[in-house]
Image (cartoon, helix red, strand yellow):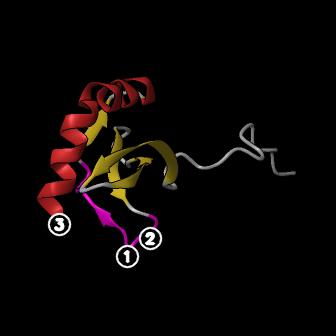
């Protein structure tokens, strides 16, 4: 008899999940910001910023520039960015 998964009903951490961040103002408009987070095969948590309301893969996005050995480390990297860095990243991909 197969064993029941302990993670039954929980999302697979390797599957990317989207999390909303507060929007920022650029050129007189509010720009929505999301973070796509996943745990890679090597166990490292990786994330990219998505700008605007488009869904991946059509959204303007950074590469996976955020990373951490744990999910908490990844979110610390997100918090450390600050709005001015997020705005500069957005400007760099326009």
Q: Mark 1 points at which residue?
A: 58
* Residue 86 placement: quadrant: top left
| 18 with respect to 82 (left or right) | right
Which residue was labeled with disc 3?
94
Percent position of residue 81, x then y = 25, 31
Mainly helix, strand or loop, the magenta region?
loop
Mark 1, mark 2: which one is toward the viewer? 2
Q: Which of marks 2 and 3 is nearer the N terminus?
A: 2
| Magenta region, residue range | 53-64
Is residue 41 shown left or right of residue 65? right
Q: Is residue 21 magenta?
A: no
Which mark is drawn over residue 47? Answer: none
- Mark 2 — residue? 54
Q: Residues within 10 Å of mark 2 (few under 14, many from 20)?
A: few
Q: In which quarter of the image is residue 56?
A: bottom left
- Residue 62 lies in the magenta stretch: yes
Depth check, front residue: 33 or 57: 33
**C-alpha distance separating marks 1 and 2:** 6 Å
- Within 10 angstroms of label 1, few (less than 14), some, or many (20 or more) residues? few
The residue sitting at 33% across, 32% down in the picture is: 78
Answer with left or right where residue 82 lies relative to residue 57. left
């Amino acid at each position: 008899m197969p064993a029941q998964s302990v993670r039954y009903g929980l999302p697979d951490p390797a599957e990317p999940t989207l999390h909303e961040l507060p929007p920022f103002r650029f050129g007189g408009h509010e720009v929505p910001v999301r973070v796509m987070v996943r745990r890679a095969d090597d166990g490292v948590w990786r994330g990219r910023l998505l700008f605007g309301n488009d869904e991946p893969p059509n959204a303007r996005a950074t590469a996976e520039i955020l990373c951490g050995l744990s999910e908490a480390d990844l979110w610390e990297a997100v918090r450390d960015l600050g709005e001015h860095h997020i705005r500069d990243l957005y400007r760099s991909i326009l």
